[in-house]
Amino acid sequence: MALGIVATVSLVGASFWSVPAAGEKSVNLRTDRIRVSYVPPKNPAHQAAYELLKERRVLERFKEFLSPLRLPRELELRTEGCDGEVNAWYEDDAITICYEYLADIVKNAPQETTPEGITRMDAIVGPALETVLHELGHALFDYHAVPVLGREEDAADQFAAYIMLQFESKRAVRRLMAGVAYAYNREASLPSLKKNPFADEHGLPAQRFYNALCMAYGADPKLFADVVASERLPKERAEGCEYEYEQVGRAMKKLIVPYIDQALAKKVRAKRTLQFDDRR
C-alpha cells in the first residue's frame, strides 16, 4: 500500500507550543516521556505500510514534536494490527493506531482533487493527524486529571482541531482542516454501521463535520471565508464560531499549556519536526 499518510503537507511547527503558560504545575513531571513502537503486522497486507512508517520515522517525528509535554509517566505511541478492526484509541498509557485504520483512510481518499480543491494527500494526512491528536487529548485529560464539562469525545475533537489550527503555515492549516472536513462529510453520507448512532459517545459524523468547519472559521474567518460563502457552514452557525474557538482557546491555555516546557518547545519549533514531503 502506498501510504500517503507519511508524505505530504509541510507542517512547519505549531505556534501552540509557544503560548505563555499560565501557572506552571510541578508534580514530578518530566519532558520527553513519549516512547514509540511499530508492532509488526499479522496481516501481510499491512507489511508495506509498516515498513514505510518505520522508514520515514513517522512515530519518531511525533515523539519529538510532543517531547515538550511534561508528563507524570511514559506515554506509548504505537501502530499495530487490530485483527480487522478499523480503529484508534487511548488506553492504559498508550495511543494505538491500527494499520486497518490507516488503510481505511487511504482507501477512502479521493483519487483526484475534488471540486473544493481537496487533494488526495489532504484527505489522508488531515484525518490521520487529527486522529493522533484526538487520542493525545484523551491521554492528557487522563494524565493531568483535566476537568471536562460535556462529552470527552467532543473535548478531544476540540483539542485536536485547536492544535491543528495553530500551525504557522496557513497553507498547511487550510489543507489539514479541509482533509478533516472531507473525511467527516464522507462518513456522514454513508449509512451508519452502529446499531444506534444517536447513543454513541461520539458526535454524529455530520455534527463533527460542522464542528470542524466552525473551529476553522472561528480561528481565521479570512482563510476559511469560502466555507460560509458556499454555505457549507450555515451563516447562523458561523456567527458564533469565533466565540466557540476562543472558548476552546481559553480552556487550552488554562488546562493544557501549563504542562508544556516552553524552552524545549521553542527548540522543537525551530527544527520543524513535523515536516512531510510529497513522496509516496
Image (spheres, rainbow, N blue to C red):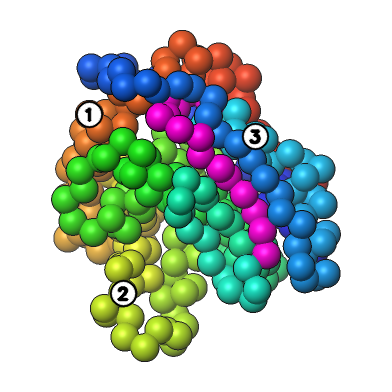
Query: What's the amino acid at mark 2?
Result: Asp
Q: Quadrant of residue 227?
A: bottom left
The numbered disc on residue 61 is 3
**Residue visible at 45% across and 60% down in the picture:** 181
How busy is the neighbourhood of tag 2: few (under 14 within 10 Å), some, or many (20 plus)?
A: few
Label 3 to label 2: alpha-carbon separation:
33 Å
CA gap, disc 1 and disc 3: 26 Å
Residue indicated by mark 2? 200
The secondary structure that dominates the magenta segment is loop
Which residue is depicted at the point 71% across and 54% down?
A: 39
Q: Which residues are magenta?
A: 67-81
Under tag 2, what secondary structure? loop
Identify which residue, 172 or 56, lies in the foreground: 56
Does residue 237 appear anywhere in the picture?
yes
Residue 17 counted in the magenta span? no
Q: Residues within 10 Å of mark 1 (few under 14, many from 20)?
A: some
Q: Earlier in the sequence, mark 1 or mark 3?
A: 3
- Badge 3 density bin: few <14, some 14–19, many ≥20, Cα 10 Å: some
Residue 101, image quadrant? bottom right
User: From what the image shows, is residue 45 above or below residue 224?
Assistant: below
Q: Amino acid at mark 1?
A: Lys
Question: Which of the 4 quarters of the picture holds residue 35?
Answer: top right
State the SS at label 3.
helix
Verify whether residue 74 appears in magenta. Answer: yes
Which x, y percent locates residue 176? 52, 48
259 displayed left or right of 145: right
Q: Which residue is mark 1?
A: 254
Q: Residue at x 47, y 74 (%)?
A: 187
Q: Please state which amino acid type lies under the numbered disc 3.
A: Arg
Q: Is residue 133 visible?
A: no
Residue 165: percent from left, percent from top = 41, 39
Provide the secondary structure element on which disc 1 rests: helix
